[in-house]
Amino acid sequence: MPARQPLNLYAAYAANFPGPQAVLLTAVDGREYTYADAEAESARVANLLCELGLQPGDRVTVQVEKSPQNLFLFLGVLRAGMTYHPLNTAYTDDELAYFLADAAPSLVVCDSTRYEALRPLCASANVRHLHTLDDAGAGSLADLAGRCPARFETHASDAGDVAALVYSSGTTGRPKGIMLTHGNLESNASTLAKLWGFSARDCLLHALPVFHVHGLFVAIGCVLMSGASMRWLPRFDVEAVLAALPHSSVMMGVPTYYTRLLADARFDAAACASMRLFVSGSAPLLADTFHAFEARTGQRILERYGMTETGMNTSNPLQGERRAGTVGPPLPDVAVRICAPDGRQLPRGEVGDIQVRGPNVFAGYWNMPDKTAEDFTADGYFVTGDKGLVDDQGYVAIVGRAKDMIISGGLNVYPKEVEQVIDALPGVLESAVIGLPDADFGECVAAVVVTDGSAPVSAGTVRDGVRETSANFKVPKHVFLVDELPRNTMGKVRKDLLRRRFAGQAPS
Ligand code: MCA
């Protein structure tokens, strides 16, 4: 048992807050929220959670649109010592039913438009409280919190307590809850804020969603650990980014953000004059994008590598050479090694399984001790499932993924999850879901489908069938109907052949 170490992520952030009147966030309507507002509003939320009878460690599930009040809700949950469980707003009721049954939250917060749909789901999952928060910051949660005191003594959490539960799917198609502790999130945010030179003078252009590690812990973490401020956009939008750039100094995004910006002629060196840093992650940044970005703006995008289970692991340097096609050396407090399938550590330059160890690495999967044990080595390294190498300069390059996961616009899609939905559709015998190159999303979801003749099947019926039960980003952009799937002698579908055959094809 590791020794207890008092640490609450909010308290770690707050130790770096500048004066109370310093601006933390400027919303898209120009409204400013100070650090004092964040302190007061998060205190109101924390008081409300306690009033509702929630206990430290209880899960608070949040599926709401991005708003400043969403940020205060996150901070309030941390302060009260509860576990924040954010969900993509694209998740459907079917997906939600699974998350609620698995996470067993005491409180669910949703948009008011979703209240009626969520009521029965919450009832069957025995969720005690359901409240609303809409994109303008109104709703029953805001009403109740507004009546609570604006002071709260932040709970004395332990570094090993679970601050957030973030789900990620897997090879089985069954999403796993990833337990991120106060210690994980604090160490990664403070390391990154230092490494990337954040200070109170910075203003981060925040266009990412706040239900993933990138937007929630990396972007917000760097700001709160350095007393910086944010330009807060409700979602990524080229027009809004162009308007916010002159007021900002740092931006974080997935590669799709940068390719969409490059597609607009107004995005040039002058538009980026106040910017000191662009960070990219969550999906591979093509060397072409890196070079086109530099040619247009004079800035070299800093690419880094992370995952939900670990936060960030490696980063190209702030000072020093940022190399296209690499994700840079390991962070100072993170160990990265490359191993052969038999576990033997490989020398520099050789491709193998990427394994990581450090204070950033999660505490395990929620209620899945066997799966946790499977993904860690005996000496405590997490087996990421990514393949890569460390070059002679110590830079890590990712060359592939072991688990044939698709990354579309920075969102992970596990083929199995989509295949299970397609296979259950009328007229479908079987399917194989693959990632194909896509100019906008980097990679997109495509389905190769074999029919059994019992019902008519078309690209439209397949897409509609997936859309009914699954988040929109999982809906195949392309559907190919074939007579049979290619298999190897073991009967396993040869997805490599399918990818080769269908790359570059975009039928209806
Ligand atoms: C939306 N659509 C997508 C995606 N997003 N399809 C595939 N992949 C996507 N990522 C669907 C929409 O539902 C719509 O479908 C159609 O594609 C076009 O929508 P559009 O309006 O263009 O999309 P958008 O609203 O502009 O969103 C695209 C986006 C967004 C801006 C790239 O997906 C995004 O912000 N992605 C970032 C995700 C992120 O934060 N990842 C970090 C994960 P239809 O018309 O059929 O309805 S954290 C992580 O990965 C680790 C830890 C790390 O290292 O950071």
Image (cartoon, rainbow, N blue to C red):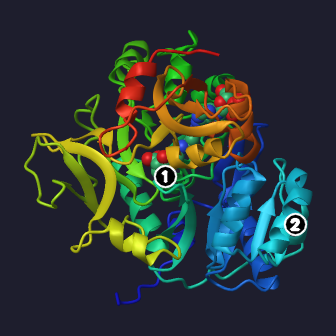
Q: Is mark 1 within 8 Å of ligand 1?
A: yes
Q: Which amino acid lies under the numbered mark 1 shown in the image of this protein?
A: Val
Viewer-closest of 471 and 71:
471
Left or right: residue 500 versus residue 215 is left
Above or below 1: residue 33: above
Where is mark 2, residue-wise?
Answer: 120
Viewer-closest of 301 and 103:
103
Q: Which amino acid lies under the numbered mark 2 shown in the image of this protein?
A: Pro
Kindly identify which numbered label has been placed on residue 440.
none
Residue 404 picture quarter: top left
Q: Residue 421 in the image: state x and y as whole percent.
A: 64, 46
Q: Residue 482 in the image: state x and y as whole percent.
A: 53, 25
Q: Residue 361 in the image: state x and y as whole percent.
A: 37, 65
Identify the secondary structure beneath mark 2. helix
Above or below 18: residue 247: above
Q: Residue at x 42, y 70 (%)?
A: 371
Residue 121 picture quarter: bottom right
Q: Is mark 2 within 8 Å of ligand 1?
A: no
